[in-house]
Amino acid sequence: GQNIDQPTEMTATEGAIVQINCTYQTSGFNGLFWYQQHAGEAPTFLSYNVLDGLEEKGRFSSFLSRSKGYSYLLLKELQMKDSASYLCATLDSNYQLIWGAGTKLIIKP
Amino acid sequence: GAVVSQHPSWVICKSGTSVKIECRSLDFQATTMFWYRQFPKQSLMLMATSNEGSKATYEQGVEKDKFLINHASLTLSTLTVTSAHPEDSSFYICSARDLERETYEQYFGPGTRLTVT
């Protein structure tokens, strides 16, 4: 079967660092995406990993371990505007996106 | 680049009527477009995959006769909710893949909020 797990909700403090984990079991693997979705808006692309390792992009970094079926999104220097849902999605053997349920991140001052 | 538009942004209709939602890729060609539905505080739910010039592929549990999808060109796909009922009220989002990119990234439209009274 296909399954993607990520925490339902996380809380962090402005200026701090937070790591959102995602574990997956999918039929075939052609990469993993992270999207950000603010309430009432469509998702926006954050990152794409297909090789093992860490990819840094400004305050956001994404890590992938294919052998462990694991990824995380690291957000540094948190800002209030980072309050959103973060969606993990994998690309399966048919190049279809399989979506996780999303992690709601709450940033407190 | 890679901008996707949706129209309308929001719509209110009466029960029993039909509503058409348009999804356009503005600056790229999209052989494949996707239609999602999202209920409050829930994740995206893929309804169907739309390929230009062919019939859409619907996910299990999605009624193809109720949610009509047409992908007539490389830049336009439409979703028509026929005989809408209050339970069809939701946030409908389309996305598209850029023909020339190899990352399989999906570019999302801004979404259409449908309320059926």
Image (cartoon, coloured by chain):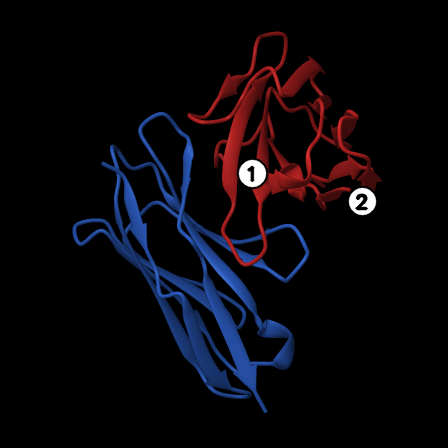
Chain colours: A blue, B red
- Depth order, front residue of A62/A81: A81
The answer to whether one can see residue A54 in this image is no
Chain at tag 2: B
Mark 2 is on which residue type?
Answer: Trp
* B68 left or right, relative to B60: right
Q: Which mark is residue A79?
A: none
Residue A14, x across and y down, in percent: 55, 87
Indicate whether B34 appears above or below A81: above
- Depth order, front residue of A101/B28: A101
Q: Give the spatial CA distance, label 2 vs label 1.
A: 22 Å
Indicate whether A2 appears above or below B34: below
- Mark 1 surroundings within 10 Å by alpha-carbon count, few (fewer than 14), some (14 through 19), many (20 or more): many
- Mark 2 surroundings within 10 Å by alpha-carbon count, few (fewer than 14), some (14 through 19), many (20 or more): some
Are labels 2 and 1 on one chain? yes
Q: Which residue is mark 2?
A: B10
Where is residue B67, by image quadrant?
A: top right
Residue A41, x across and y down, in percent: 68, 55
Query: At numbered mark 1, what does the secondary structure look like: helix, strand or loop?
Result: strand
* B19 left or right, relative to B38: right
Q: Quadrant of the N terminus of chain A?
A: top left
Residue A42, x across and y down, in percent: 65, 50
